[in-house]
Image (cartoon, rainbow, N blue to C red):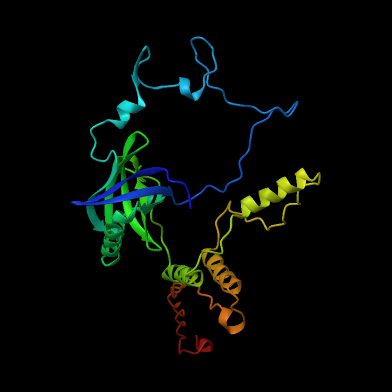
Amino acid sequence: MPSTIWSGAISFGLVTIPVQVSSATEDRSVKFHQYHLADMGRIRTRKVCEIDGETLSQEEIGKGYELTKDQLVPVTDEELDQMPLPTARAIEIVAFVDRESIDPVRIADSYYLSAAGAVATKPYVLLRRALERNSKAAIAKFAWHNRERLGLLSIRDNALVLHSMKWPDEVRSPEGLAPKDTGLDEDEIAQAMKLIDSMTTDDISAFRDHYREALEEVIKAKSEGNAPPAPADEERKDTGGAIDLMAALNASVQKARESRGETGEHATVHEMKPRKKAAKTAPAKKTPAKKKTSSRNPRSA
């Protein structure tokens, strides 16, 4: 069980649910240290006071807000803990919204909420079942790490999960990023839909971090005094010029079906080509009229 990082309560109207919070995810990426190339000495970051040049420990360091370049307002942890906020020790449910209305861009880290003691069991299960039986999502406010945050409550394997969210003014507008609409053939769109169907799955648990695995192989080889594994030969894709979109879609559908084990007639892809516009028929050329021959005998002239 992951360690508790915060303790408080869910406030659901007049119902209070004591909970403990633990992180729902973990960072599995490979970490590096910086070192001196000449002698392999570790490079460390030290916190140094710019007035007396002394290296400080964490206990000697406080927080402060810079009003001007020469004026700093010190703020202690005790003052932050005693701020008059209703969300200081509570995850306060403030509204319910349709789940489909949640913008995925706004969702950040996720945390598991466990019931803190026997007194929390019944209201915890009550909230969980209420969320399970409708299409609404609970929006909550809570204060962690010296700031108030917005959150979303969901359910995973019968456990309540709190997803921290960005405030509306923290999400940048994508205006100007999308390309202008361009002419697409209906057959191209239909083939793109077929590609989506051929790549659809109900289970993504088999996906792995291949970069991390390759990096671990490099580290293992070097630690044993061996050369790093040779890079895999992969066909490079030329993305510099224009592509034949329909040909790329047809090939992608075929590849996706083969990767799913569909062979033979099941993997057959009926290639769809853009409809060609009917060629304009040139007007028929008029046959030049034959010159009328004089019925008079030339010899008689």
> Is 16 displayed left or right of 184 in the figure?
left
- Give the image quarter of residue 281: bottom left
| Residue drawn 56% across the image and 22% down it | 46
In the foreground, 247 or 12: 12
- Residue situated furthest front in the rendering: 118
- Give the image quarter of residue 285: bottom left
For the image shown, how many numbered marks are present on the structure? 0
| Residue drawn 37% across the image and 50% down it | 163
Q: Is residue 155 above or below residue 11?
A: below
- Residue situated furthest top in the rendering: 52
| Residue drawn 58% across the image and 53% down it | 239
Measuring from the top left, give residue 78's x and y in whole percent: 33, 27
> Is 101 displayed left or right of 293 in the figure?
left
Q: Is residue 228 above or below residue 156?
A: above
Q: Is residue 41 above or below residue 182?
A: above
Q: Is residue 151 visible?
A: yes
> Is 190 displayed left or right of 91 in the figure?
right
- Give the image quarter of residue 86: top left
| Residue drawn 67% across the image and 52% down it | 214
Measuring from the top left, give residue 138's x and y in whole percent: 27, 55
> Is 123 displayed left or right of 300 in the figure?
left
In the foreground, 37 or 12: 12
Q: Is residue 178 visible?
A: no
